[in-house]
Amino acid sequence: MNKHARAHAVRPEIMVEDLMIPSDTVGISLHLRNKRPAALKTFSAERTILIMHGATYSSESLFDTPLCGLSFLDHLAGHGYDVFAVDVRGYGGSTRPPEMDAPPEASEPLVRTEVGVRDLASAVEYILKHRGITRLNLVAMSWGGSVAGAYTAANNDKVVKLALVAPLWLLKGPAPIDAGGRLGGYRNVPVLDFKERWLSAAPEAARSRLIPADGFERWANTSLATDPQGSSQAPPVMRAVNGPILDIREYWAAGKALYSASDIRVPVLLVHAEWDQDVPIASAQDFFLSLKHTPYRRWVEIGEGTHMVLLERNRMQAFDAISQFLGEDYS
């Protein structure tokens, strides 16, 4: 089942293992990266985490690009967690739908949110079985937040806690990620050109110090490396499926929720950053106030950060807020 597993130590105290696990679709495998303390021999629901990426970039790109020698996965594993990060189909190391071998206009938008929820469910079931546990913690960002939220709303019994970074929710108008026009199966993302849009969310005086030194280049190279076919073009691109964009257009930007936040019945942490233009603060507040049946909920607002706060100079504030939340016992 995971004959493609590869395990080694990234540093003496942390192990990394890359797995290819089956999805619910024949021919589609999902990439699952695991980092954990090398000394960890027994596993528990409370100390197990599954992380989910957003609409454009993979889990490795967002959560395992080391800045100043440390990635988000490294941070969590260093705090004693058995942490997994999944790529749904079409992203990162997971299988690309066959339609992605043809021009984008030859297919309809690929990998809609419902498919993302199914792939997340496949990863959850794999981890629960192989760790011998019945629940785990979910951490997710942006579109991944809507995937993890929808999954949790329907599977509260399998989730200990839910931590969401700028989760996609109701928007007042089009999303910045949606360029408009007809959507093909996927889009070609010129990753090296993203820095301007990233920095534009911050006030001009703060832009030069927003991203750690060499951080953008390191992140961009990691992102492009996840798609050898796209990055071999000139100029290099990374292909990203358009199903999430269509769902944003037809649901979130149209004022229609894809799931009911009031169905979430586990503790929830909402992490948001001051300069986030993709998920504005009004959207974050609407989501937070919609969590009507959680045992408890918390909102942490990070000053001087954008939608990409997990890769910015204030990222440790977000890292610490999440690890603290997951480590609490208020039962």
Image (tube, rainbow, N blue to C red):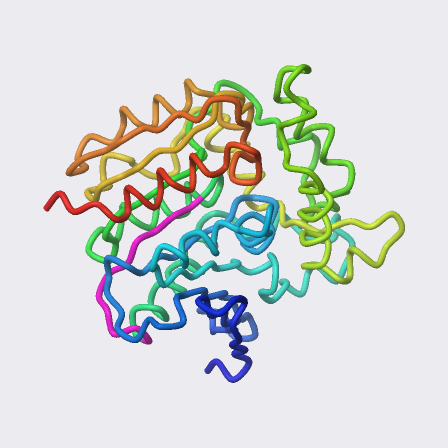
Residue at 27% across, 50% down: 154
**Magenta part of the protein: which range?**
130-140
Residue at 62% across, 47% down: 109
Whether residue 4 is situated above or below residue 32 in the rendered picture: below
Report if residue 261 lies within the magenta region.
no
Whether residue 62 is situated above or below residue 13 in the rendered picture: above
- In the rendered image, residue 196, in percent from the top left (x then y), is placed at 74, 28
As drawn, the residue found furthest toward the front would be 12
Where is residue 24, by image quadrant?
Answer: bottom left
- In the rendered image, residue 41, in percent from the top left (x then y), is placed at 30, 75
Residue at 78% across, 56% down: 230
Residue at 28% across, 59% down: 47
Report if residue 139 lies within the magenta region.
yes
Tell how many labels: 0
Residue 265 is left or right of residue 26, and the answer is left
As drawn, the residue found furthest toward the right would be 234
